[in-house]
Amino acid sequence: MIITDYKKEFSRCLGCKLKPCERACPLQVSPHDFIALAKQDKYQEAARLIAEKNPLPQTCGLICPDIFCKKACIRGRVDAPLEIPCLQAEVMKRGGYPILEFPPSCSKKAAIIGGGAAGLGALFELLHHGWHVDLYEKNKFLGGALRLIPDYRLSKDILDFEINRLISNNRTTVFLDTLITDFSALQKQYDAVILCLGEIRLRTLGINGEECCLPYDKYLKSPRQYLGKKIAISGGGEVALDCALTAKRCGCEQVEMFVRRRREDMRITALDQQELEKFGIIVHDLSSVVEVQKKPHGLCLSTIKNRLDENGKAIPCDNTICQLDGYDFMVQALGAYYPKELIPQGFIIAGDMSGHGGMAVQALASGRVAAKKICTGDKP
């Protein structure tokens, strides 16, 4: 969202005494309070309020959806809700970041396995309780799924800056490119272990020819390796949206999304819907891909139309199979998950492993909650 007059947007805040925006934030950041300071041009103080509770404040401002503080904004009952995430990002840009200050060091030491949003949230909380932390990440960079978000939404410079701010202290040791599999052995070395392993298994359609499709994470890591004139994307969430817009920005002439439910049921914001229109992305709603065939002229997709039953579940309609061909490739963008049966017992878990890491702000909050359990002596 591009705001041309931030002062005007700040002035639209009604200053609600009940602060519904704060209650709606998973991290309990108070837009009411930081906007009140921004109205007085006290951006440094406003930024401090945000950064006290949000480990990645500008990152969240740039990518947060409209289902939290913005949805709760009372101004929406008058005309339109405030663009709170955008305002948060602007406050951090203008106000800068306060120096991280920690309480006196204690003798406790924890291991965090996983350097995505949940792991970073846990690190933030432990440091604020005086703990020392070893952070293990299997990849070469911290950030997890945040690294898959395209640059036009989230600059990697901003993400890197905010991560480095968290880890640049004498209480944090980071081990990159380090895969940990024996979690029990770590329990003997540390006072506590927090598992934040993210989503390790991609969701699939379970259809014939699915092996011909490109996983969304592989595509988003290096989209310019997969160029084409006509591509298909299966999925209707933010990941699918990122794939579609990235393809367009890479020069793809025709991008088609296949969404099993209605367009209005897609898990994206109203602004995202406008982006789809702006870039001319075709959305086949109430449509599912049921087979993929590789042919000399490209991929051929068999699709079927759906209807919604009384519970809102998508049900295939009889005699609606359609053949669509000529696709250079198809991206599977249905999201991912951590299988419950693989979760080790007896550990504190956070983020996607706990089912509370769908959005970055939720993963950060989940990590903070997990770490707080350890600091207060609660057992898993």
Image (cartoon, helix red, strand yellow):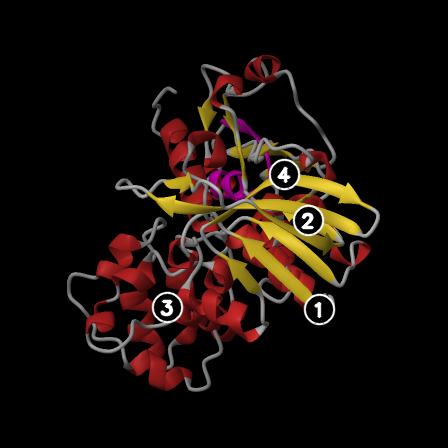
**Can I make out residue 155 in this image?**
no
Q: Nearer the viewer, residue 158 or 123?
A: 158
User: Which tag is nearer the camera, tag 4 or tag 2?
Assistant: 4
Which residue has dot 2 on it?
330
Residue 134, image x, y percentages: 61, 32
**Can I make out residue 252 in this image?**
yes
Does label 3 or label 4 sit earlier along the sequence? 3
Q: Give the numbered dot on residue 253.
A: 1
Q: Circle 1 sits in a helix, a strand or a loop, which is it?
A: loop
- Magenta segment, which residues? 108-122
Q: Give the numbered dot on residue 84.
A: 3
Q: Circle 4 sits in a helix, a strand or a loop, which is it?
A: strand
Check disc 1 and give the amino acid type: Glu
Check disc 2 and give the amino acid type: Met
Which residue has dot 4 on it?
291
Does label 2 or label 1 sit earlier along the sequence? 1
Distance of label 4 from label 2 (alpha carbons): 12 Å
Does label 3 or label 2 sit earlier along the sequence? 3
Check disc 3 and give the amino acid type: Ile
Q: Circle 2 sits in a helix, a strand or a loop, which is it?
A: strand
